[in-house]
Image (cartoon, rainbow, N blue to C red):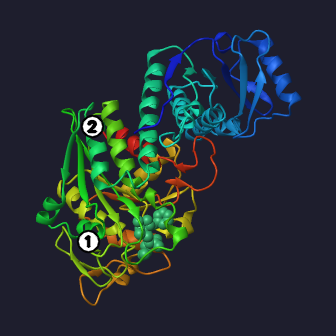
Amino acid sequence: MPGATTPSSYASTTPTKVSAAVLVLGVADGSVRGLDSAKTVRTAVDDAARAIEFTGKAGSTARIPAPKGVTAESILLVGLGDIDAASAGDDAAAANEVLRRAAGAALRALSGASSIAVALPVDSPAAVEAVTVGAALGAYRFTTYRSGDDDRVPGPVTVLGPKGKTYAAAHEAGTIIAAATNAARDLVNTPPLDLYPESFAQLVKDQAKSRKVKVTVLGEKELAAGGYGGLIGVGQGSTRGPRLVKVEYSPKKARRHISFVGKGITFDSGGLSLKPAASMEDMKSDMAGAAAVVEAVFAIADLGLPVRATAWLPLAENMPGSSAQRPSDVLTMRSGKTVEVTNTDAEGRLVLADALTDAGAENPDLLIDVATLTGAQIVALGNRTSGVMGTPAARTTVAERAAVAGEDVWPMPIPEELLSGFDSTAADLKNSGPRPGGMLAAAAFLQEFVADDAEWAHIDIAGPSFNTGSAFGYTPAAATGAAVRTLVEIARDAD
Ligand code: BES
Ligand code: MN
Ligand code: ZN
């Protein structure tokens, strides 16, 4: 199932002496960086950059022949943009994101290159991790469904940097985090013909085999017996029934427990409140939250972090089959609350509510749900910035860790007056709420299924999870793997 991946290793070889088909070098403000001890080569590269007017704009790349004194066959120059400003402002997170994007842009430009050495200016383990992550994310190609096109995948990457265990460990961590992000991309890119609740659950089991995690899958009978009205209601219009998947990583040394819930709609047609064709096109990506939370827990396990981490994946296909739920049906949710379904296209909150009930029952120290929940997220924050809502402490944690991870996540409120917009004439709540403010309203609905004393955050990744435009930095077209890095960063900080 997963596409071909590019192996990555770490070395402290001098950049000019490394054997590789392509040596990647960074340029800022018209001068090459990270070649301090090789003055002649540095001058030759600077001259070449000037000759082709390559100044080092972020995202730009240019291929040049290797000058004398360089073992590699050719050089790929990549722009480091305003890395100097970030470094001068002591903004390590911003500087690391410049490196991540530069490494990503470089690897995107190197389809088919046989071997690549990346020599960007790295002076800390976090910078080495950033370059490693950026390179591995930029090397991602979704080749599973292409015939004879595997040569687009770049060859093995060697990340160059200082000697020492902490640097090698940073490369190792970066490799794990990028692999998890790429695995989430694979899940999201997989067509819904092949990725549906049962097959998704099976893939989770397969991927869990090599890891110290426990997987539990609830099937349709168990969901009915357990009163998971939201998950069943959303899934009942499809011939391919819903599942609830739980993945647990519980190392002995753990003191804190973080729980993640991810929206897993393997295809969102809207149900009987059918979406127009144009809005349905990318709805294979409506399980990006589930993909993010499960791959994040796998990465947390692979990193051996001393924190208990649980992923909950409510999986359903939202289809308008003849057994589909109808607008005006009333569901009795897992929590016991009743919900009148006024719009079957507001399905994400229904499946999340049931999973949040179970996740919350374990009283985790931190509860975070991730969901492609509303078109309103895109209206409010655009395609690249996720919204985070919830209790103030959890919301701040998410926003801060996202910045360290290099993801754009912006804190948003849950205005209290929005809840009354869900008043129903037939049940405790209805599922489609007030507009404008649809992203915030959806959070107000979810909050009804979260205990008052829980530290909870809701991340709406509707736009950022799927890039409908062209590739940039380390972000390809289509699935992006949004939120994986943020969740891992939260777990790193949680012990
Ligand atoms: N999956 C969609 C939200 C979405 C839209 C994700 C565009 C990614 C891109 C969600 O299930 C949905 O349909 N939401 C509705 C809610 C409304 C009916 C209350 C929306 O946002 O229009
Ligand atoms: Mn929908
Ligand atoms: Zn949806």
From the viewer's perspective, is residue 350 above or below residue 298? below
User: Can the viewer see residue 259 in this picture?
Assistant: no
Does 164 appear above or below 456? above
Q: What residue sits 22% from the left and 76% below the top?
A: 331
Mark 1 within 8 Å of ligand 2, using the beta carbon:
no
Count all numbered tags in the image, as a single digit: 2
Which label belongs to residue 233?
A: 1
- Which quadrant does ligand 2 occupy? bottom left
Name the spot of residue 8 as percent of width and height, x first.
50, 24
Identify the amino acid type marked 1.
Answer: Gly
Name the quadrant of the C terminus.
top left
Image coordinates of residue 377 in percent, x first then y, are 50, 66
The residue that disc 2 covers is 208
Residue found at the far right of this picture:
51
Q: Is mark 1 on a helix, strand or loop?
A: helix
Residue at the far bottom: name it. Answer: 425
The answer to which quarter of the image holds residue 424 is bottom left
**How far apart are the two marked residues, 1 and 2, measured between alpha carbons?**
28 Å
The residue lying toward the viewer, choosing from 437 and 475, is 475
Residue 462: tell me if it is visible.
yes
Residue 197 at x, y percent in the picture? 30, 55
Which of disc 2 and disc 1 is earlier in sequence? 2
Nearer to us in this view, 112 or 474: 112
Q: Which amino acid does label 2 sit on?
A: Ala
